Image (cartoon, rainbow, N blue to C red):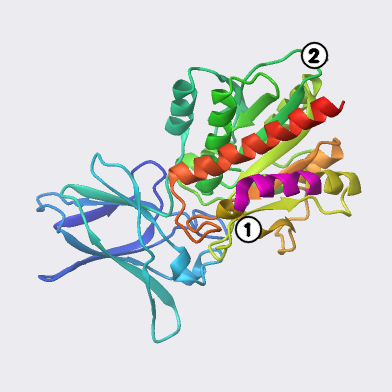
Amino acid sequence: MMLEATTAIPYGNACDVSIAENARMTTVEFAPDPHGGPEVMWFCLRVRRGPGGRRVPRNLKLVLRNAGNMLGAGKARNIHPVLRGAGGDWTRMEAGKPRTLPDGRMNVSWRLRVPDQSVDIALCYPYGQDEVESLVSQTGEFYESHKIGASQEARPIVRLSNTSGSKRDRRAGLYLLARQHSGETPGSWVLDGFLRHIAAERRKEPLVWAVPLADIDGVEKGDYGKDNFPYDLNRAWGSPPMRHEVLVLQRDIARWRERCRPVLAIDFHAPGLCEQDGMYAFLPKPESSAEAFDKATVWAQLLSRELGKEFSAGEFARIATYASRWETPGFSVFCASLGVCALSIETPYAISADGGLLTRDRYREAGARLALGVLKQLQTSRSNR
Ligand SMILES: [Zn+2]
């Protein structure tokens, strides 16, 4: 075998892999692996020279099998994976070519000009512990990093903070969260940009606590993680909570509330692959808390304005109406029960509101704009007090 495909790389995920080689073309076919969950989306694999094989051929055809099984994946033009050669950096690929098979299934394919030794392909730019460490070091250790507990599989859950504050502190406070669904890396890149903006301003008010990798087990194992068993993290926020990660986060939020005047909590996500109109926010349902809904509506209006037409979907403020597999509450309902206003912000995988492709810099730009919007609003409410 000249070539082999492996998922034994960070965040690896693929199944049903086959490689067909002939004189004219080498074709690598794969599908996303459910990893025990009901939905698929995230994939990440490496194609490399096999034992005794020659270099990876320059012309490679990549086929994503059964793309219609991915969450919201009716439109091939919204799927723009990222690619990197050995030792290189990720770049965004063009949209693939959809092909409907005789029985109606859909595959999507790409023709690649690949580097010599190996090529990695992923649904979107990965974001993990290395990126969190880079954020901390590149912002001059502005953020402290604390282990607030352990995951189900005993990996540390890390929270960043610009200050620990102190009890009965009255400064404004933000609590930020990403990767409750572990494959939703666009949410992480937006949070990264948000935190870098706060750090660049050297702001100790608001007090900012952030958990960048909430489902750290799913992140490390390359799970997509939406509705994953035994319990979706973002449906485990009841009392008592159904996941240990959520118990840890709830205790942390209790400490945060004692050390600030809570003004906003944001949970960063990425939606299904059908979304192509830009970023949007889910608000708490008015029936769960009219007060939380009203406050969230005000925040959504100003954040949408700050994101601008480059990033914000025309319909920015939304109420989740999709069928849930669990009846138990998520993060924003939990926050509302404490009188804390919370938003979930959804950032698409590839296409922005202006039709352009989302890159790491553009995700971060969107995050910086959100942070700027929050800081402006806090400034206004301070001068009105
Ligand atoms: Zn999500």
> Where in the figure is residue 220, as x and y percent of width and height?
46, 39
The vertical placement of 5 against 182, above or below, is below
The dominant secondary structure in magenta is helix
Q: Which mark is in front, 1 or 2?
A: 1
Q: Amino acid at mark 1?
A: Ala
Residue that protrudes farthest toward the top in the picture: 166
Residue 149 visible somewhere in the drawing: yes
Q: Which residues are magenta?
A: 297-308
Q: Secondary structure at mark 2?
A: loop
The number of callouts visible is: 2
Circle 1 is placed at which residue position? 313
> Where in the figure is residue 160, as x and y percent of width and height?
59, 24
Q: Amino acid at mark 2?
A: Lys
Q: Residue at x 78, y 31 (%)?
A: 380
Circle 2 is placed at which residue position? 167
Is residue 46 covered in magenta?
no
Residue 276 vs residue 205: left or right? left
Q: Residue at x 9, y 53 (%)?
A: 54
Q: Quadrant of residue 369?
A: top right
